[in-house]
């Protein structure tokens, strides 16, 4: 076969916040950079991040600093975080935010012209720099506008299906043009994975169609280790009605601006279940919580701004006990603040313009007049590719990862807003160290047999016909249905084991998937190729979940309700065995530095 061939010093796979920031940094180091994105440039899932980016700028409350941010991140992650990544993130996020501003990001402002910051779940002080509820969109716009002047070559609507190695080092990637179906071969001295998450492995998700775990699966097949895949975050507030919009994100910014959660009885149920670790900082009455959302330094935050895992489980409890909304969710009410603020409706529209239009257009609801119906939706994976904290290199030489597809920063549960600053901090580091690595390498030969094998495998679905062939969409649907039901928000040994037992059959079915037509614009073919990655990451989640016999962060076991102090010292690590099997083990975390432990103690 013949392929279009491209050669770069650094190849970045994924054009969201992490990929764009990595490409900008690598290009500024004087190396040639190729940027591959599965969709169109500007359609990255980063645009769906609405609430803001967490950075301890101290513009609204001058008591905030990197040490408090670090302690909040570690506490939110239940201390399973890579403490070095959490330290770097907290220290460098303010510089990355100001850098984005210097590149043209138009943040909301305080009265004295500083970047405005809002409250968010799990953060002690107002910390999220934001642009209304469209922060991710502004981030992507700014990075793209800045990046196009850096000499980066962009390959849009291109899917990578295999990483290529020479010995123990990654030396390129093989993929195809989604529009015409033509194969593309990329030679690179270093590769950065910034491909996002795995949400499409579940039935109800806020994630768009691109999130099929491509980076996780590519790295795993190339020999890299994955870590902590059991920790999947279910955002407490996604749309539940009508069915066509189920799962679409409702930003935490609604609660940050004063939105409250009520059950069908009209009761604010979050006051009933405040964890001991948060009782000293969480309001126990409505008045105090309202003052906090208005920036009163002496008030405690409302319980709606507890960590996402806790809020999601409280919502599930209300639904299961018969106090849910008519369509299987609960009510999120921001309209009530009209009683407190003059021109309350206009205030809501100004602070939450995307949410106002989203509900008006998709659900026929005016959020300034009536409550929204919301429920948990699969949102984010804390687990991912195991990387070095400083360089972001994986356990395979020349392969780097940043953003959601990399593990470590968030531990057992991510705080809202930490994702956007994560993209910038570690995207910058991945680009910096990938460029440095590339400068030290020579261009290595590509194994043509590997390329031919990848091409043949990709085309196999066209060769399957007859009664034995199955459509890819049904296999994908059954996988999503199984994961939602058996490895969802509330887990148990028996249900997870059913999922584990179901994977061999799903793999067999995926290997029999057939598609019709030709390679141009063939969505069925794209889905068939995505199945391989979806099955791999879903199995990694299930096998990790069955191994962790405790409840911690986003991983909740109804048969092991308490935290296990011993398991709290262990990360779950996944490797590909010599026979191709998935090996899942637990390894002890590195001891935290004494000075960082003291910061945690000082900020409890």
Image (cartoon, rainbow, N blue to C red):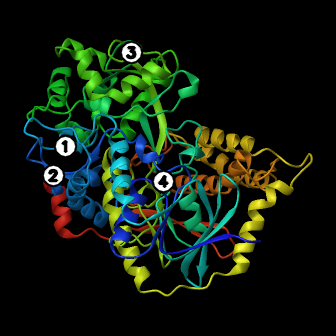
The circle drawn on residue 196 is 4
User: Who is closer to the viewer here, 504 or 178?
Assistant: 178
Mark-to-mark CA distance, 3 and 2? 40 Å
Give the spatial CA distance, label 4 vs label 1: 27 Å
Is residue 414 in view? no
Q: In which quarter of the image is residue 598?
A: bottom left
Q: Earlier in the sequence, mark 3 or mark 2?
A: 3
Q: Nearer the viewer, mark 4 or mark 1?
A: 4
Residue 49 shown left or right of residue 257 in the figure = right
Taking the image as shown, residue 458 lies to the left or right of residue 565, namely right
> What x and y, as percent, mark residue 64?
13, 49
Determine whether label 1 and label 3 are within 8 Å by CB: no
Mark 2 and 4 residues: CB-CB less than 8 Å, in contact? no
Q: Mark 2 points at which residue?
A: 603
Q: Which of 306 and 604 is in front in this view?
A: 306
Q: Which residue in the protein does label 3 denote?
A: 366
Mark 4: which secondary structure?
loop
Q: Decide if residue 318 is on the left or right side of residue 496.
A: left
Q: Residue at x 43, y 19 (%)?
A: 360
User: Image point 8% across, 34% down: which residue?
Assistant: 298
């Amino acid at each position: 076969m013949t392929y279009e061939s491209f050669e770069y010093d650094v190849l970045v796979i994924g054009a969201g916040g992490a990929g764009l920031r990595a490409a900008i940094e690598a290009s500024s180091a004087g190396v040639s950079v190729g940027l591959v994105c599965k969709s169109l440039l500007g359609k990255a899932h980063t645009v769906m991040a609405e609430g803001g980016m967490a950075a301890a700028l101290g513009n609204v409350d001058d008591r905030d600093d990197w040490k408090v941010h670090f302690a909040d991140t570690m506490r939110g992650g239940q201390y399973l975080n890579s403490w070095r990544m959490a330290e770097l993130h907290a220290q460098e996020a303010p510089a990355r935010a100001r850098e984005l501003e210097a590149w043209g990001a138009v943040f909301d402002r305080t009265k004295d012209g500083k970047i405005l910051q809002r409250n968010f779940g799990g953060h002690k002080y107002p910390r999220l720099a934001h642009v209304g509820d469209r922060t991710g969109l502004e981030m992507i716009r700014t990075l793209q506008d800045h990046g196009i002047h850096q000499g980066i070559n962009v390959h849009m609507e291109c899917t990578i299906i295999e990483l290529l190695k020479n010995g123990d080092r990654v030396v390129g990637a093989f993929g195809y043009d989604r529009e015409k179906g033509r194969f593309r071969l990329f030679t690179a001295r270093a590769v950065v994975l910034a491909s996002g998450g795995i949400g499409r492995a579940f039935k109800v998700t806020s994630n768009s169609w691109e999130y099929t775990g491509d980076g996780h699966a590519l790295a795993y097949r190339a020999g890299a280790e994955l870590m902590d895949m059991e920790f999947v975050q279910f955002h407490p507030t996604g749309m539940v009605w009508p069915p066509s919009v189920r799962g679409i994100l409702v930003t935490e910014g609604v609660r940050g601006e004063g939105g409250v959660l009520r059950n069908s009885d009209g009761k604010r149920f979050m006051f009933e279940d405040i964890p001991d670790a948060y009782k000293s900082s969480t309001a126990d009455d409505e008045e105090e919580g309202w003052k906090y959302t208005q920036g009163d330094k002496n008030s405690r935050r409302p319980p709606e701004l507890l960590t996402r895992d806790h809020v999601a489980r409280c919502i599930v409890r209300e639904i299961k006990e018969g106090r849910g909304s008519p369509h299987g969710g609960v009510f999120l009410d921001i309209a009530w603040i009209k009683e407190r603020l003059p021109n309350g409706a206009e205030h809501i529209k100004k602070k939450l313009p995307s949410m106002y239009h989203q509900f008006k257009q998709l659900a026929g609801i005016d959020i300034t007049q009536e409550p929204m119906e919301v429920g948990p939706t699969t949102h984010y994976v804390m687990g991912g590719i195991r990387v070095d904290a400083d360089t972001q290199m994986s356990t395979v030489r020349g392969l780097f990862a940043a953003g959601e597809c990399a593990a470590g920063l968030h531990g057992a549960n991510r705080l809202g807003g930490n994702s956007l600053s994560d993209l910038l901090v570690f995207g910058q580091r991945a680009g910096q160290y990938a460029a440095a690595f590339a400068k030290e390498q020579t261009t290595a030969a590509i194994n043509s047999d590997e390329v031919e094998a990848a091409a043949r495998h990709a085309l196999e679905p066209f060769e399957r016909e007859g009664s034995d062939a199955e459509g890819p969409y049904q296999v994908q649907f059954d996988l999503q249905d199984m994961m939602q039901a058996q490895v969802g928000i509330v887990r148990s040994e028996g249900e997870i084991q059913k999922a584990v037992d179901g994977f061999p059959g799903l793999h067999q079915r995926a290997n029999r998937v057939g598609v019709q037509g030709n390679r141009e614009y063939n969505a069925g073919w794209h889905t068939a190729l995505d199945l391989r990655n979806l099955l791999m990451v879903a199995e990694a989640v299930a096998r990790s979940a069955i191994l962790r016999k405790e409840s911690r962060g986003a991983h909740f076991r109804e048969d092991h309700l308490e935290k296990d102090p011993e398991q709290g010292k262990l990360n779950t690590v996944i490797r590909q065995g010599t026979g191709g099997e998935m090996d899942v083990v637990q390894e002890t975390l590195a001891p935290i530095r004494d000075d960082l432990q003291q910061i945690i103690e000082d900020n409890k």
